[in-house]
Amino acid sequence: MALVTGAASGIGKATARRLAEEGAAVLLTDVNEAGVAVAAELRESGARAEFARHDVTSESDWEAAVARAAELFGGLDVLVNNAGMGDLLPIEDTTLAEWERTIAIDQTGVFLGMKIAAPLLKASGHGSVINISSIFGTSGGFGTSPAYHAAKGAVRTLTKNVALHWATEGVRVNSIHPGFVDTPILDGARGTPFEQAMLDLTPMGRLGRPEEIAAGVAYLASDDSAFVTGLELYIDGGYIAR
Ligand code: NAI
């Protein structure tokens, strides 16, 4: 029983598909109603999958989404905090409103998810939370997108903090740090000098595929990783090794 946020697109969509292929019942959530069709497609392939509209910045939306998972599946083993977006400008040009919006989605959304899903995750006896951070959670990137970097860095240490707190409570908490992955989140960079820079900065010389991140989620969600908690897993074509 899994809840995947931001599941209408990109990494979240690939993750929902992969977890469904592994036999999980999946609640896909997003503010983007395109998730309705993704859930339908998964059901057509024989999976148990539903969609719920869910803004991760809203505490009441979180309460409704977690309650829906409990109602549909009778519990929750796996929470994938994937929903995210980025700011693009340098610090001088970032408004307070833009900063607060990015922090609300990329950072506070992860806090709310773990807080509100905690009772179900603990009750499962083998819960697993996978928080999608970024290579930009541990590096300064291009020197732009200050709120994105701050939020993704916060997700990295929040993950370790909650991993310690739940270490003996049957809930593991890990973060995944994707490199540049070919999804719509990169659309703002296409056709700009950042596009080539992403390839130049990636030792493997290509963008990642959403399925390559989903494979890491599947590992951390499964009992194959039963002794793994507080880990930061880089799936980045070698970016962080430089
Ligand atoms: P995407 O843009 O394809 O998907 C992000 C999804 O999050 C969208 O469906 C969007 O509607 C949803 N979302 C945005 N705000 C939301 C909100 N308030 N509540 C609920 N859903 C919301 O992007 P992608 O690449 O699949 O991103 C997934 C995660 O991976 C994000 O956290 C992103 O920061 C992270 N990531 C992506 C990288 C990349 O190069 N694609 C690199 C490193 C991290």
Image: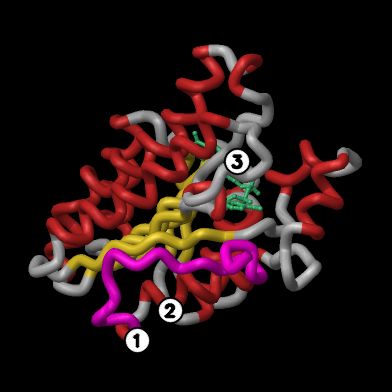
Visible in this render: residue 25?
Answer: yes
Q: Residue at x 59, y 21 (%)?
A: 91
Camera-near label (2 vs 3) is: 2
Establish whether ligand 1 lies closer than 8 Å to the Cβ of label 1. no
Identify the residue under disc 1: 224
Find disc 2 in the rendering and name its residue: 219
Point 30% across, 83% down: residue: 223
In the image, 5: left or right of 34?
left
Residue 173 location, x and y as percent?
A: 28, 62
Helix, strand or loop status at disc 1: helix
Task: Say which quarter of the image contains residue 79.
Answer: bottom left
Q: What's the CA distance linking mark 1 and mark 3?
A: 33 Å
Q: On screen, 172 above or below 4? A: below
Magenta stretch bounds: 225-242
Question: Marks 2/3: CA distance?
Answer: 28 Å
Across and down, in percent, residue 106 comes to 46, 38
The magenta stretch spans residue 235: yes
- The quadrant in which the C terminus is found is bottom right
Camera-nearest residue between 158 and 50: 158
Image position of 142 (left or right of 16)? right
